[in-house]
Amino acid sequence: MAVSFKQLIVILVIAATVFRLAKPIALQFGSEGDFARRRNVWLFLTITAFLSPSFWLYALLAIPLLLWAGRKDSNPVAFYLLLLYVIPEIAVDIPTGSSLQIFPLDNFRLLSLCVLIPAAWRHRRSKAANQNRKITSMDVLLLGYGLLQILLYVPADLPNHVLMPDSPTNMLRRAFLFFIDVYVLYYVVSRSCSSRRAIVEAMAMFCLASAIMAMQGVFETLRHWLLYADMLTRWGSERFTGYTMAREGILRAQAAALDPLALGYLLAIAIGFWLYLRSQVISRRSRVAVFVMLWAALLATQSRGTWIGAVAVYFAFSVLGPRALSRALKAAMIVVVTIAVMSMTPFGDKLIHSLPIFGSTAANLDTLLYRERLAERSWELIQQHPLLGDQLAFTKMEDLRQGQGIIDFVNTYAEVALSYGIIGLSLLIGFILVALIKSQLQAKRAAQSDSDFALLGVSLTACIVGVLLMITDNSFWSGVQRMFFVLAGLAAAYARIGRIPEIPERHPLVSAARGGSSNSRLRR
């Protein structure tokens, strides 16, 4: 308990510092009442989690608070994104008093049940719902992917290799979990973000949550101390967190994501959001500080795939936005100079040598070899069952089982194609590609008349490009999956509001600082 208390103090000091410094920025995108409530809920839930001996005591206190705060909040999507990683994803089975299992509960599902579903219900009963009742192509693709997940049973890869049989109850469970984990998230984001201000505020709250995790991650690497590991033990989680925690003697940051890859993925998206949000921030020092902090934490994760993804986001934003050539050249110069400066420091030298193309350590070579073998075996099995996949594929890949007892699918494309075939993969990737095309086309249309709105679309497009690249090196789980559907929902909302003419709005502080009218930015 003493260790948990020390970790709590560190986390609260970091969070209080970030909330204090971020408040002037956050108030440019939302109200002071919403900010104060969200901050207080974040702090209360964090304290409750560290002082609770079990997840169920935490849930008992969190559920009424989330229901109340979610109803009071003017933007439930922003509220959801700030609390997405208030605690790690620690799944606990719902007790039934028998051998029957309902489904595991974690913080993601608490947020879905207490924040998203009530928000979806309120939206359906509102007048605005009449404008959004139409089923779109993205809805069809996502529901088609969900239907495949319900009809095609992929048994859990249990440690004892027992294959659990399917049943009508299992099908109902899969349908319910797809609804609360996936569809309701996309539905609320795409429908309730009905204005430019709502989208921008949601992006700002995600950046705020990422800034907290960024500082936590940097602290973990510098102090060689994981801040949330003790919570797993206290709550009886069987999740393994010790794999590849250090490279070249550097502890890999993970913060509340409990995984360096997941944390790097989230930070890369936050960088893409910040590329737009910084245009709204008056203080140059703040613009640079946030950018540096996010990149520092990204480097601390030692997640090479997400480094490439973040660079891809940066270049996509530069190429797709205004003054593409000059921005692209500037981005290239920044990357080159950063690598050159880092190479002259001991820390940077370790980072560079951790890359497979520069490093020659056994860990690097093993990682490359494993991924090559995984790609080869996956392609062989996909060719055998191309359309609907092989739901027992993992039983034919025992030679790829690692020391942790798992087959580490670090490629979402292969993972989905193996389980649901080319049809399933086409539905999922088609879903996000439609979002990408919609946001980019809308950004192009807005470029001549509303450069700020166009830049918002470019940010969303760049993030989706980065995500499509990063999931080649990441499993489709946890926050990776959630932010995939959040991005799709934001892009769909962006395309929708671009077709609705509205009176422009702009925060007065931004207007005064730039000499513009108070009604020229953040409209819709």
Image (tube, grey):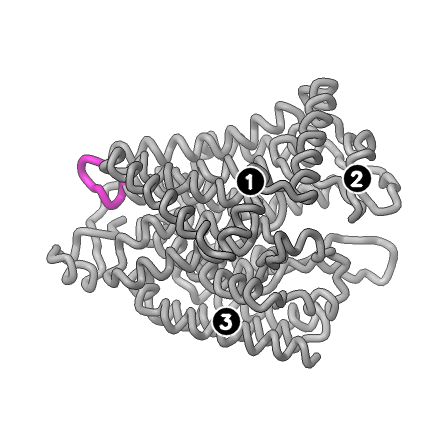
Q: Amino acid at mark 2?
A: Arg
Q: Name the residue rendered at 51%, 57% in the picture.
A: 347
Question: For this view, does 181 lie left or right of residue 310?
Answer: right
Residue 477 point in image, percent of width and height: 63, 46
Looking at the image, tell me whether mark 2 or mark 3 is earlier in sequence order.
Answer: 3
Reply yes or no: does residue 301 show up in magenta. Answer: no
Q: How many marks?
A: 3
Question: Quick check: 437 above or below 21?
Answer: above
Foreground residue among 484 and 2: 2
**Alpha carbons under labels 1 and 2: distance apart:** 27 Å
Reply yes or no: does residue 450 show up in magenta. Answer: yes
Q: Name the residue rendered at 65%, 36% in the picture.
A: 368
* Residue 401, disc: 2
> Does the rendering let one see residue 90?
yes
Per the image, the residue denoted by label 3 is 41
Instruction: Look at the image and give the residue range highlighted in magenta.
Output: 446-454
